[in-house]
Image (cartoon, helix red, strand yellow):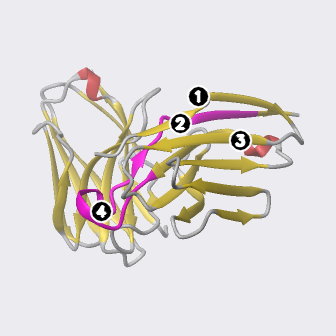
């Protein structure tokens, strides 16, 4: 089955700096890669996702890049703000085969943005 | 409340108890999921239902028994749990398999 590795496990930045979180996956059939943000005591919420037919997607201060050849994808947050502090999870799934529709999550990254 | 709801939000039970977790989605979705979230571990997929049929049982012990009576409701029946089963249990739904998943607020379960 799919295996997703996420790094770093913790990330501390100053307000205004950029933050980058990286994930690798093992199943070359995976073609859907969402990122979830989970604030303390709250439910995970989708912040951005990418499918394998594109290499990059951007939404305001958040961007995701995908390298299918290397089987890794990254979350980029620019101009970080204290409210960006949360746990971020990457995930991967495919739209076919035995992993169809089943998200495999990374271990999570605790991002802390210091004012 | 709109979206995905879960009850109860907190549950404390003994190892010999039987309890059930409930999830309801108000989004018209066809797929529903149970996840287990433990401290310092990734979200673990437990069960997947699509159009009320179970399509995945991710090697979950039989002391966890899911039930999906219709596409809007999902239950997780608990029986003779162990202390290591203490975790946050999250329900999610998606329009179909492979689409964006929307999570409920979770049930914080403590097994004494």
To which residue does mark 2 refer? Answer: A6
Closer mark to the observer between disc 1 and disc 2: 2
Looking at the picture, does residue A94 appear above or below residue B44? below
Chain assignment, label 3: A
Comes first in the chain, label 2 or label 4? 2
Q: Residue A80's quadrant in the figure? A: top right
Chain assignment, label 1: A
Rendered image: mark on residue A100: 4
Tell whether label 2 touches label 1 (CB within 8 Å).
yes
The residue located at (43%, 63%) in the rendering is B4
Q: How far apart are marks 4 and 3 (CA)?
A: 28 Å
Q: Is mark 2 on a helix, strand or loop?
A: strand
Q: Residue B88's quadrant in the figure? A: top left
To which residue does mark 1 refer? Answer: A9
* Category of crowding for the residue at label 3, using alpha-carbon neighbours closer than 10 angstroms: few (below 14), some (14–19), many (at least 20): some
Comes first in the chain, label 2 or label 3? 2
Q: Does residue A56 belong to the magenta stretch?
A: no
Rendered image: mark on residue A20: 3
In percent of width and height, residue A4 lies at 44, 41
Region of the chain picked out in magenta, as a range: A92-112
Is residue A95 toward the left or the right of residue A73 in the image? left
Q: Is mark 3 on a helix, strand or loop?
A: strand
């Amino acid at each position: 089955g799919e295996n997703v590795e996420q790094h770093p496990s913790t990330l501390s930045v100053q307000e205004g700096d950029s933050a980058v979180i990286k994930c690798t996956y093992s199943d070359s059939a995976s073609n859907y890669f969402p990122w979830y943000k989970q604030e303390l005591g709250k439910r995970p919420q989708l912040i951005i996702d990418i499918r394998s037919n594109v290499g990059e997607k951007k939404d305001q201060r958040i961007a995701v890049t995908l390298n299918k050849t290397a089987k890794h994808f990254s979350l980029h947050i620019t101009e970080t703000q204290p409210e960006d502090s949360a746990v971020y999870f990457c995930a991967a799934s495919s739209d076919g085969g035995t992993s169809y529709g089943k998200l495999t999550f990374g271990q999570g990254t605790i991002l802390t943005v210091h004012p | 409340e709109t979206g995905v709801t879960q009850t109860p939000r907190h549950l404390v039970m003994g190892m010999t108890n039987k309890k059930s977790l409930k999830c309801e989605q108000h989004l018209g979705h066809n797929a529903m999921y149970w996840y287990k979230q433990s401290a310092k571990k990734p979200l673990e997929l437990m069960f997947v239902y699509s159009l009320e049929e179970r399509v995945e049982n991710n090697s979950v012990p039989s002391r966890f028994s899911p039930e999906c009576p219709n596409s809007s409701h999902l239950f997780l029946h608990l029986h003779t749990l162990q202390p290591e089963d203490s975790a946050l249990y999250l329900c999610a739904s998606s329009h179909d398999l492979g689409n964006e998943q929307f999570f409920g607020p979770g049930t914080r379960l403590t097994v004494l």
